[in-house]
Amino acid sequence: MRRPVAIRLSAATATATATLALAAATGAVLSASATTASAAASGATGYASQNGGTTGGAGGQTVRATTGTAIHQALCSRASSSTPIVIQVEGTINHGNTSKVSGSSCSTAADRIELKQISNVTIVGVGSGAVFDQLGIHIRESSNIVIQNVTVRNVKKSGSPTSNGGDAIGMESDVRNVWVDHATLEASGGEAEGFDGLFDMKDNTQYVTLSYSVLRNSGRGGLIGSSETDRSNGYVTFHHNLYENIDSRAPLLRGGIAHIYDNHYVNLTKSGINSRAGAKARVDNNYFEDSKDVLGTFYTDEAGSWQVNGNIFDNVTWSERAADNNPAGPNPQSNTTVSIPYSYALDDASCVPGIVSRTAGADKGLLVSDGSCSAQSPDPTTPTPTPTDPTPTQPTPTPTGPTGTNLSLSAGADGSSKAGGTSYGNVRDGDLGTYWSPAGSTGSVSVKWGSATTVSKAVVREAAGGAVTAWKLLDADTGGVLASGSGTGVISFPTTSLKKLTFQITAASGTPRIAEFETYAG
């Protein structure tokens, strides 16, 4: 049974004395400082940095809380539901010290930490640490939320006590821009023991990053989308996290786009990254260890897809394919492409176990990777790294061309977008005076044939002022990467029979101008 506490504070009429007295009574201490906690100063990464960014309560009042009721009171004491606030949390937060608090700027509940219909909030663990014991954090119809340096453990959906549907951190119903960083999310078993997901996103949740966190000892790591039809979620980044002793859902993706890089996976017993129902996952430089079926489409015949680069599979076993079981291994290959709109720096997969062990989880001093396999303190003034793509699989092509018939002259052409005054067909007309440009700085152009055609070389020729700095050559029939590099010219790749060949520009110094995309059999 919920135990409502009739505490209501009107920001417009309460005096400073009354505010301080109420804060003391509920376990909160209001700081005179109007700056954010230094612990939350480093700034969001990944997709949480998009869509206007995620800053939480930056610039708002700082409040110290030692009970769940104090957290709710801090939310309810704001002038409005969007007034920025930083809540520094210390101690153990549980059912015994968490009550519902009412107010015009909040909507709370007694059996969870409720972040509902609010925005511009940071919750950050400080001092000796913050532990949410058997009490989940629920984010609903909210935006611009930062949760940092906390432990959430043993949240149950059945048994006693229950909280938040069994999710350690759960998001649902039009949630935007959430950054969860340096968190430890853990259970003590699976659904049979009363637990559910550690990190769940449902019903139109977008622009989320989970970074430098530990997820362990659970049947379910987390999901994006509650069912095969809940496909309005996405744009989620998972980086530098440890998934350990997880049965499945690491994560489960239903629709949407996820970027999963530099994570360490240990002892996934049933399945790992489950891309299904039209989802697209970009999976870069992860280390998978002592696990089973770490990537694929599982438990459904509604397929998802993935792009893989630079991952290490260490003692990974793969099951046989069946109607509703399609592992990507034993030799995972890309079957889609996913363009990433933000800058990031990749650690080499070989050092991921080491850097994740030093940085991931609560109470690690908020250490982060420097992008070169070393740990450092977060620095909000550090320049944003340049966009990172996997190391080219082919040397930079030379400007000379092969001999033989240019097969593109008899092919069709299409692409992802085109700038005004340009045409896809300009790349296959044999005329260096015409060209195609994407609508932005990146994009793709393809040549295609009516029947399977054998090719083993391509020549990409740029018009004057060439700007391409990184590219991939794709078998568009399968989504596989045939080659990648950092300069245009002659591209050699294994002889392949296909109907469509795609040149994808992943980085450029300006607007690219592709004059010709030639193809040759040998």
Image (tube, rainbow, N blue to C red):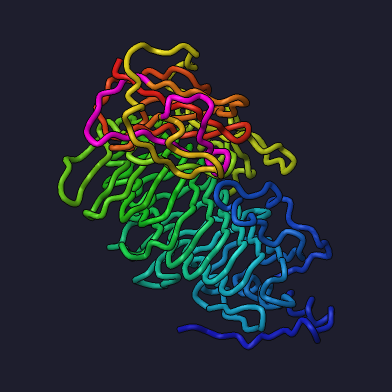
Q: Residue 365: percent from the left, percent from the top? A: 64, 43
Q: Residue 503: percent from the left, percent from the top? A: 43, 32
Q: What residue is drawn where x is 63% and y is 68%? A: 119
Res 286 quadrant in image: top left
Location of the N terminus (image quadrant): bottom left
Q: What residue is drawn where x is 62% and y is 26%? A: 465
Q: What residue is drawn where x is 26% and y is 47%? A: 270
Q: Which residues are magenta?
A: 429-457
Q: Is residue 16 above or below residue 428?
A: below
Q: Foreground: 83 or 8?
A: 83
The reply, left or right, for residue 280 in relation to residue 17 is left
Q: Foreground: 73 or 238?
A: 238
Q: Is residue 332 magenta?
A: no
Count of numbered circles in the view: 0
Q: What residue is drawn where x is 53% and y is 56%? A: 207
The reply, left or right, for residue 2 in relation to residue 334 is right
Location of the C terminus (image quadrant): top left
Q: Is residue 456 magenta?
A: yes
Q: Foreground: 522 or 68?
A: 522
Q: Residue 111: percent from the left, percent from the top? A: 49, 75
The reply, left or right, for residue 134 in relation to residue 306 is right
Q: Is residue 186 above or below residue 112?
A: above
Q: Residue 55: percent from the left, percent from the top? A: 67, 56
Q: Is residue 28 above or below residue 377?
A: below
Residue 347 at least partly seen: no
Q: Foreground: 468 or 230?
A: 468
Residue 378 at least partly seen: yes
